[in-house]
């Protein structure tokens, strides 16, 4: 039987004096579901955001959690949503529970829009999520006005303090009357659920320490709620959706016993008085400690066990609780500091500022970081562990699908390069002997069982991209290149020799027999393929740079020959006169003039990595003209460019199977690449607007909020597939394109990422925490 992890959860409370500040979290009368700029509490200048409310809720609220800590969704209705903090990744537990209640002179209001008998609820909730912070303003017929700022530590450049498994809920209260009010704030948390541990009985007891409250332990999972600097007036069982129990919080909580059976949840109530016009902020601290996950994605699975990296930094409940309780002010100030750099950048539009920040929520939704312990192999360094992201935990759960990392790892490279290095070293370790990169690290939450998979045509180029991003970000570190060079050569030689009967043309072609898939799988390609050509040619450009840096003249000569031969073949066999055709196999007559909307993927890839493109400049210009009137035509396809379309701008009606991409589909991260290609080629206005339409489709148009898919209908914007897809982190490539610089441009002195990292490091003077050795 797999030994389950000891897990701990802490809830603490602290009260700030009346002079804690009188500024509102949000100004009044902000538009709903429209990007706006406004002033917000704690920020030195205007911010940019998209406001949801409980009447027009987001499909999923913002997750609370940091790097690989698991996360807990805070819904725009004020309830708790999906929860993975106890390692229930698959399926995710959906709580759908109110968790805060306020009693004022014995009358009780849920801090939620959920209606329960016996209590009142919020008429509405205005909600501004700016990961890792969510600001909520409750509209209630209550004499005490209530706002809440909830957040988790996430600090670019500081992986230690971004690896704290916890969240803080700052509840701001204002007695807006001339009468003294007797108040009670209660919090309820369900704890771990059935299926997360064995039901061996639940042991609960009073707890006195850094927090004051009670503990509950079930099997190897335990948790605690308590108050920082205050004694709990009452403790009890959880309240869940029991309106009668919530209505009594100022007097009594549900009775608890020990051992308990079938109920792991707890609640705590704190009494206080608000004088006329008095303001107070009560800080609730929630910390969890569940250091082991099962590779099958749920704790009772029969797979292998891996240990979270945060267990190397925090050895107990007290470590996590103490960190959040003692450093919350510093940690929050550093979050506000780095976000303020983005909000204050006058070159970025409001929608981009908001989505750059909120896109980072995909990291806690998808990432794990395993310690270098068995079953992870001996190749793994203790300080590295294995950092990996799950393609789509609720849709296609597999770890580190290599094209997903091609699309989505740039903010990891920028903000947490040690994680990018951990990930790249794992890709190197899992490479097959013939040079073929692994397709995945394992399924669904396995990170030490690599598989070659079925998609391999572009995987070598993905590996090249993963390394080269890191290499450029580290200033072309020759030591790093020496470490990876043998592996990169093997991957390149494998990738460029999959159709030997074609000679140099093989570098732009499908493998022999047209086997394998590209990123846009489920469609059949033949012979020479434009998308393959561009990506492989960009890969060869990178490889030439490596060979030059290593003074490997023999391999450089070979690469340059392949680059010229492939480039010549692409222009001869794939150019139609106005765009590049989908594919051409002369010996069989298989030729398709279907227009692929993302035929210039390799062009963007080349420019982003600091080269001059892979296709003839005048032909790229003509292709962009054609795409603008066809697959990227905003009048016909308002929500983003088609994957496949006709040159006249219409849908593919017959003669070609678009697979699951459909004849109306838009692949969001590839669409962003196309938008950036327009920008790099001097069409900034059109390219930026194309990117805005894509992000509006994901976040705003159908109230996606913090649930980002990858396949949307270009005409309606309706999502066709995907949840929590980290491919969409491609968005972080856009600032470099807007500067007309390669990927390392934002890292240069004064660049956006450089300023973010410096701001996050300067503010707050927080302790760096325990390093892993």
Image (cartoon, rainbow, N blue to C red):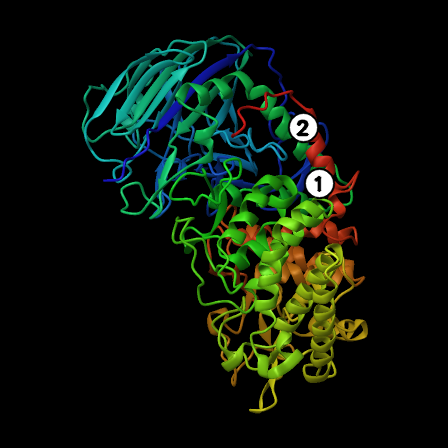
| Circle 1 crowding by C-alpha within 10 Å: few under 14, some 14–19, many from 20 | many
The disc at residue 382 is none
Considering only vertical position in the picture, is 404 above or below 748?
below
Q: Is there any visible trace of residue 102 in the rendered image?
A: no
**Proximity of marks 2 and 1: CB atoms separated by less than 8 Å:** no
Q: Is residue 384 above or below residue 520?
A: above
Q: Say few, some or many: other residues with alpha carbon within 10 Å of mark 2 (under 14 / 14 to 19 / 20 or more).
A: some
Camera-side residue: 330 or 586? 586
Q: Is residue 461 left or right of residue 621?
A: left
Provide residue 402's location: percent of width, then percent of height: 52, 57
Closer-to-camera residue (720/180): 720
Residue at 58% from the left image edge and 79% from the top image edge: 500
Q: Nearer the viewer, residue 535 or 22?
A: 535
What residue is rendered at 71% in x and 40% in y?
753
In the rendered image of this protein, does residue 179 appear above or below residue 764? above
Q: Earlier in the sequence, mark 2 or mark 1?
A: 1
Secondary element under disc 2, as helix, strand or loop, is helix
Residue 582 in view in this figure? yes
Pointer 2: what residue? Answer: 761
Would residue 422 appear left or right of 740 to someone viewing this image? left
Residue 646, image x, y percentages: 62, 79
Q: Quadrant of residue 131?
A: top right
Q: Secondary structure at mark 1?
A: helix
Q: Quadrant of the N terminus?
A: top left
Q: Residue at x 67, y 74 (%)?
A: 630
Percent position of residue 454, x then y: 45, 67
The number of numbered badges drawn on the structure is 2
Image location (x, y in percent) of residue 59: 46, 48
- Does residue 411 sit above or below 246 in this rendering? below
Find residue 753 and name its label: 1
Q: CA distance from mark 2 to mark 1?
A: 12 Å
């Amino acid at each position: 039987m797999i030994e389950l992890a000891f897990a701990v959860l802490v809830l603490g409370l602290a009260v700030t004096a009346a002079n804690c500040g009188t500024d509102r979290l949000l100004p009044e009368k902000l538009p709903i579901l429209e990007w706006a700029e406004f002033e917000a509490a704690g920020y030195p200048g205007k911010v940019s955001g998209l406001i949801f409310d409980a009447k027009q809720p987001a499909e999923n609220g913002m997750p609370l959690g940091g790097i690989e800590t698991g996360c807990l969704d805070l819904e725009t209705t004020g309830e708790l949503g999906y929860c993975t903090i106890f390692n229930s990744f698959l399926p995710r537990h959906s709580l759908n529970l109110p968790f805060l209640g306020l009693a004022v002179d014995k009358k009780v209001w849920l801090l939620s829009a959920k209606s329960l008998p016996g209590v009142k609820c919020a008429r509405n909730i205005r909600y501004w999520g700016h990961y890792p912070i969510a600001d909520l303003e409750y509209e209630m017929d209550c004499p005490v006005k209530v706002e809440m700022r909830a957040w988790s530590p996430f600090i670019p450049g500081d992986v230690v303090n971004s690896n704290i498994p916890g969240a803080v809920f700052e509840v701001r209260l204002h007695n807006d009357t001339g009468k003294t009010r007797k108040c009670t704030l209660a919090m309820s948390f369900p704890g771990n659920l059935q299926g997360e541990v064995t039901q061996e009985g639940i042991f609960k007891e009073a707890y006195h320490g850094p927090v004051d409250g009670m503990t509950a332990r079930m099997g190897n999972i335990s948790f605690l709620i308590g108050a920082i600097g205050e004694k709990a007036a009452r403790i009890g069982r959880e309240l869940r959706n029991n309106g009668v129990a919530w209505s009594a919080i100022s007097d009594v909580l549900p009775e608890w016993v020990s051992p308990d059976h079938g109920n792991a949840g707890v609640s705590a109530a704190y009494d206080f008085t608000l004088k006329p016009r008095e303001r107070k902020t009560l800080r609730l601290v929630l910390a969890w400690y569940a250091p082991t996950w099962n590779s099958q994605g749920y704790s009772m699975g029969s797979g292998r066990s891996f240990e979270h990296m945060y267990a190397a930094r925090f050895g107990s409940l007290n470590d996590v609780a103490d960190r959040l309780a003692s450093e919350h002010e510093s940690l929050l100030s550093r979050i506000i500091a780095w976000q303020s750099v983005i909000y204050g950048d006058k070159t970025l539009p409001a929608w981009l500022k908001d989505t750059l920040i909120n896109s980072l929520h995909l990291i806690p939704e998808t990432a794990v970081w395993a310690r270098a312990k068995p079953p992870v192999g001996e190749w793994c360094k203790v300080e590295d562990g294995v950092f990996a992201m799950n393609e789509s935990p609720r849709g296609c759960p597999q770890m580190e699908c290599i094209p997903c990392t091609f699309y989505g790892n740039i903010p990891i490279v920028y903000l947490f390069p040690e994680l990018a290095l951990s990930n790249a070293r794992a890709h190197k370790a899992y490479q097959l002997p013939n040079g073929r990169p692994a397709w995945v690290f394992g399924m669904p939450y396995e990170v030490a069982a690599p598989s070659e998979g079925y998609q391999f045509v572009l995987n070598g180029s993905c590996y090249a991209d993963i390394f080269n991003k890191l290499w450029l970000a580290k200033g072309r570190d020759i030591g790093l290149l020496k470490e990876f060079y043998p592996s990169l050569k093997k991957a390149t030689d494998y990738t460029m020799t999959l159709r030997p009967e074609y000679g140099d043309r093989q570098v732009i072609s499908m493998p022999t027999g047209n086997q394998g898939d590209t990123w846009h799988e489920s469609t059949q390609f033949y012979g020479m393929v434009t998308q393959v050509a561009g990506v492989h040619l960009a890969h060869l450009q990178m490889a030439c740079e490596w060979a030059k840096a290593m003074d490997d003249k023999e391999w450089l000569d070979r690469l340059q020959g392949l680059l010229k031969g492939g480039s010549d073949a692409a222009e001869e066999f794939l150019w139609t006169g106005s765009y590049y055709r989908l594919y051409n196999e002369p010996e069989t007559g298989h030729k398709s003039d279907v227009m692929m909307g993302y035929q210039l993927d390799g062009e963007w890839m080349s420019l982003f990595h600091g080269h001059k493109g892979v296709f003839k400049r005048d032909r790229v210009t003509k292709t962009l003209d054609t795409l603008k009137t066809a697959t990227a035509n905003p009048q016909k396809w308002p929500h983003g460019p088609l994957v496949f379309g006709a040159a006249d701008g219409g849908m593919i009606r017959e003669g070609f199977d678009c697979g699951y991409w459909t004849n109306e589909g838009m692949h969001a991260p590839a669409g962003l690449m196309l938008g950036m290609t327009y920008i790099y080629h001097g069409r900034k206005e059109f390219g930026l607007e194309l990117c805005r339409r894509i992000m509006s489709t994901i976040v705003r148009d159908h109230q996606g909020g913090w649930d980002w898919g990858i396949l949307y209908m270009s005409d309606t914007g309706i999502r066709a597939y995907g949840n929590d897809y980290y491919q969409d982190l491609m968005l972080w490539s856009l600032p470099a394109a807007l500067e007309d610089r390669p990927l390392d441009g934002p890292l240069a002195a004064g660049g956006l990422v450089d300023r973010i990292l410096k701001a996050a490091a300067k503010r707050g003077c927080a302790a760096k925490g325990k390093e892993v050795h």
